[in-house]
Amino acid sequence: MTNQSDEPFTHEIVKPVALNLPVYWIIHDAKEQQHAVPRHWHEELELNLTVSGQLTDFLIDGQVFDTQTGDVLVINSGSVHAIPIQKIGNEALTLFFNNEFLRTALPNISELVFATHPNAISQVESTELVDYLYAMHYTVRHDPTNYLRITRLAYDILDELVMHFSNHDFGVNPHLIQAKDEKLYKILWYIKTNVHHGLTVSAIAAHFEVSTSYLSRYFKMKLQMTPLEYLQAIRLNKAYQYLMNTNKSISWISDMTGFGDVKSFERLFKTTYGLSPKKYRQQFTN
C-alpha cells in the first residue's frame, strides 16, 4: 500500500451557496489527477460513490477497500479514513450530510452505525441507494441550484441507509458494520478542537489520565499511526485549507494550526507536499 504520509492531498469541502441544504459535496473529476487525502476524521456522515472507474486502497478504520463503478462506501461520524493518490480517469462523488439536518431528521442518529460497504451486503437492496446517489451526482453536476431535488434526494438516500444498512436492520451482518469506539472518538474530538492551542502528545495523555506510552500503543492499535503523526496530519489538514482557501499569511496559518513556529510548519509541509507553503500556494492557485 502507498505511504500516504509522503504524498500531497486535497480535501476541500465545497458548500453550495449560502443555503442550509442537507448535504454538501465534492465532485472528483475523471479528467483531473486526484490527490491523496491522509488519515483524518470529521463529524459529518460521508458517502462516496465511484461514478466511473475504480478506487484503490481506500482506508476506513483500518480496513482497506477497492471499489468498482457503482460501489458505495459509507464513512460514519468519527471514522478515521484516508485515500491514496488515484489515477486520472476515475470519477467519484463525495457527499457530506449536514449535522443539523441529521439530528433533526434522525433524533437517534448518535445510536446509528451504517454499513461501510452496502454493495457487499446486498447487491439487490443497494440498487436503489446507488440509483439515488447517481441522481444526486447528475443533479449537483448539471443542475446545482435545483435545491428542491437535492433536498429530496438527500432524504431518499438517508432513508435507504436507515432502512437497509444500519444497525437497526437485523438483516445486516454486524461484522460488516464499523462499531463506534467512544473512547477513540473522544480523544480524536479533543485533538481536533484543541489543535490550535499548541497541543502536545503529553498534554493529550494528561487530559485523559493515561501515560504517553499507553496512548502511543492505543493509537498504533486503533489507527496504525502514532499520536504525533495523527496530530501532524490534523494540523496539516487545517493548514492546507487556510493556505488554499484564504489569503492569510504563512505565520498566521502556522499560529492558527498550533505549530510551534513558522520553520517547523514549513519543514513539515515541504516534507509532505514537496514544496514550501508559499510556493505551493503560488503554483496551485494561479
Image (cartoon, helix red, strand yellow):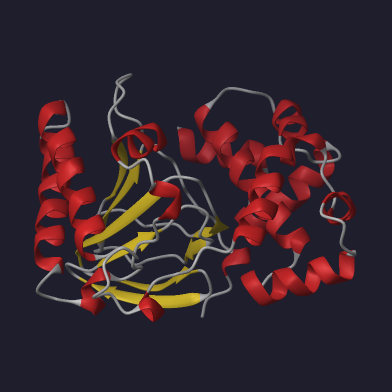
Residue 261, by quadrant, is top right
Q: Position of residue 258 (x, y in %)?
A: 77, 38
Q: Residue furthest top?
A: 18
Left-right relation of 144 to 222: left
Tell me, yes or no, if residue 274 can be seen here: no
Is 219 drawn above or below residue 232 in the view shown? below
Q: At x 80% / y 41%, what residue is drawn? A: 259
Q: Residue shown at 30%/22% (left/top)?
A: 17
Side of 13 relative to 5 (left or right): left
Give the percent coordinates (x, y) of residue 161: 24, 57
Q: Is 156 situated left or right of 67 in this image? A: left
Q: Is residue 43 visible?
A: yes
Q: Residue at x 21, y 73 (%)?
A: 119
Compared with 117, 273 (above or below) is above
Return the residue nearer the eye: 174 or 8. Answer: 174
Total number of numbered labels? 0
User: Could you tell me residue 26's position as x and y percent?
Assistant: 32, 44
- Hey, which quadrant is residue 211 in on the image? bottom right
Q: Give percent across and percent down for residue 191.
A: 71, 47
The front one of 91 and 278 is 91
Q: Quadrant of the C terminus?
A: top left
| Relative horizontal placement of residue 143, taking residue 84 as reference (left or right) | left
Question: Residue at the spot x=54%, y=61% of the render?
Answer: 80
